[in-house]
């Protein structure tokens, strides 16, 4: 799928990813309306119920199974990052090649986040990083997170450092004179 066009600004998918690749939902019916729209527009919607997860291992097994990760998947955050990176770049698993994009949906994520706050933050950060990377290649990946806690908050995800360009990477190349 190509990048969005200027006339897509009113479309739901564009609005969901224009500021972030991970979007919170409180009302389940609103989430269902959004996922129905996305499904109707060719997105592969993969939904996971986070109430079944009480550990990092449960989370990683659940996502790996839902996205059909290969047998060598190591069920660690590094392994998840590698395999989800493959999915985001439309590897041979995780997403149908003809799909408009991938929508990873976590329902009742507040239950898991209360039990494993650090793991909850890490997984969302990895998803956001890979969604941003996918966008660089015209591929669409987003994550919708439903919480029954309307006050739930997460630290920013997908943050990247501001880096110098290649020609000015070394501090010596930025000295006057």
Image (tube, rainbow, N blue to C red):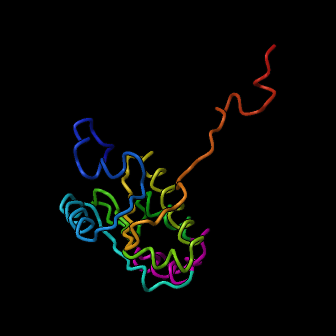
Nearer to me, 12 or 170: 12
- Give percent across and percent down for residue 44: 29, 65
Closer to the camera in the image, 86 or 162: 162
Depth check: give the residue in front, 71 or 20: 20
Along the line of sight, the residue nearer the viewer: 18 or 41 = 18
Q: Is residue 99 left or right of residue 141?
A: left
Q: Position of residue 54 (x, y in %)?
A: 52, 85
Which residue shows up at 68% across the image and 28% down it? Answer: 167
Q: What stretch is highlighted in magenta?
A: 56-79
Total labels: the figure holds 0
Q: In this view, does 1 lie to the left or right of 69?
A: left
Left or right of 32? Residue 23 is right
Q: Is residue 41 above or below residue 136?
A: below
Residue 120 drawn at (x, y percent) = 53, 70
Q: At 22% across and 47% down in the image, what residue appears?
A: 11
Which residue is drawn at the image coordinates 70% and 28% (left, top)? 168
- Picture quadrant where residue 145 is located: bottom left
Q: Which residue lies furthest to the front in this view?
A: 151
**Residue furthest toward the left?**
40
Left or right: 9 in relation to 83: left
Q: Is residue 177 above or below residue 86?
A: above
Residue 57 within the magenta-colored segment of the rendering: yes
Residue at image coords 81%, 27%: 172
Spot occupied by residue 74 in the image (x, y as percentages of width and height): 59, 78
Question: Which image quarter is the C terminus in?
Answer: top right
């Amino acid at each position: 799928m190509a990048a969005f066009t200027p006339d897509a600004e009113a479309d739901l998918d564009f609005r969901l990813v224009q500021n972030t690749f991970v979007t919170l939902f409180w009302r389940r019916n609103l989430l269902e309306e959004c996922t129905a729209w996305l499904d109707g527009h060719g997105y592969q919607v993969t939904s996971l119920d986070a109430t079944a997860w009480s550990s990092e291992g449960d989370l990683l097994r659940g996502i790996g199974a839902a996205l059909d990760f290969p047998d060598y998947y190591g069920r660690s955050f590094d392994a998840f990052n590698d395999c989800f990176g493959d999915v985001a770049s439309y590897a041979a698993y995780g997403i149908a090649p003809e799909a408009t994009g991938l929508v990873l949906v976590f329902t009742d994520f507040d239950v898991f986040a209360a039990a494993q706050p650090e793991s909850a933050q890490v997984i969302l950060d990895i998803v956001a990083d890979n969604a941003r990377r996918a966008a660089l290649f015209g591929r669409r990946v987003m994550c919708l997170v439903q919480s029954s806690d309307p006050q739930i908050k997460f630290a920013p995800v997908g943050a990247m450092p501001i880096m110098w360009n290649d020609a000015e990477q070394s501090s010596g190349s930025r000295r006057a004179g």
